[in-house]
Amino acid sequence: MLGSVWETEGLQTLGIVILVCAGLKLLHLLGLISFSEDSVEDELELSSVRHRPEGLEQLESQTRFNRKELQILYRGFKNECPSGVVNEDTFKEIYAQFFPQGDASMYAHFLFNAFDTDHNGSVSFEDFVMGMSILLRGSVQEKLNWAFNLYDINKDGYITKEEMLDIMKAIYDMMGKWTYPILKDETPKQHVDIFFQKMDKNRDGVVTMDEFIDCCQNDENIMRSMQLFENVI
């Protein structure tokens, strides 16, 4: 019974990851409501912004967003983060608002580390827009690479069962009372055991990026979830 439930629901773990990441983007895009045709140059040169983003032409070439989309993204980002950068506490505050019925702090920690690509303790507009470009407009390969990086907590190039369990527990803690039926304490471990066994094809105790991507690409649920937010903006 557990196996069948996990095949229909549990394998959508990566879809949950993408969904929640997109939730962060939607929060920052509240600026869409007051969007106007102000010049991008004026937006990017406000003296109150401590961290100034790279020029739009450079960001256009590095992402799959056009100039107007970058302007919209920047306005929303600046409204939420006037200093021009986001720290981990801000991530936790955002997710606490999204998931008041659970504890989102640990998931927000993992997600922050995935966005903080240079590991300097803050997420700049560049970090944010590069990540969202992958999640919303990237190829399947790029999205799965990003998801692998999220699960690879210590960034050693492998996912261990312990790392996968940490992420799974963080997701369940964040969902809180929304999980139905109410999960037993051992349920995340049981789900991870099944999922990990499917991914770790050579049984060496770790999942490589190739194993991770191959398994995901052969799972219809995960592939459908990869397409959920391709046309958000």
Image: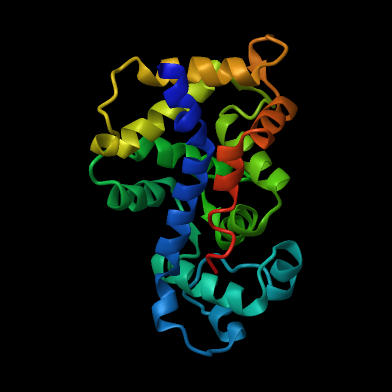
Answer yes or no: is residue 27 visible: yes
Q: How is the image coloured?
A: rainbow
Q: Position of residue 12 (x, y in %)?
A: 50, 36
Q: Position of residue 66 (x, y in %)?
A: 67, 74
Which residue does the image show at 53% across and 65% down from the upper left?
232
Instruction: In this rendered view, identify the residue nearer to me: 185 or 63.
Output: 185
Picture layout, residue 161 above or below residue 157: above
Residue 204 quadrant: top right
Which residue does the image show at 70% across and 15% down from the upper left?
201
Q: Give the side of residue 129 with respect to residue 213, left or right.
A: left
Q: Position of residue 7 (x, y in %)?
A: 50, 27
Residue 171 quadrant: top left
Count all numbered tags in the image, as a single digit: 0
Q: Give the side of residue 24 with respect to residue 14, left or right.
A: left
Q: Quadrant of the N terminus?
A: top left
Q: Position of residue 176 (x, y in %)?
A: 27, 35
Which residue does the image show at 51% across and 50% down from the upper left?
122
Q: Give the side of residue 143 with respect to residue 210, left or right.
A: left
Picture layout, residue 10 above or below residue 228: above
Answer yes or no: is residue 166 visible: no
Instruction: In this rendered view, identify the residue nearer to me: 126 or 204.
Output: 204
Q: Quadrant of the C terminus?
A: bottom right
Which residue does the image show at 57% across and 65% down from the upper left?
231
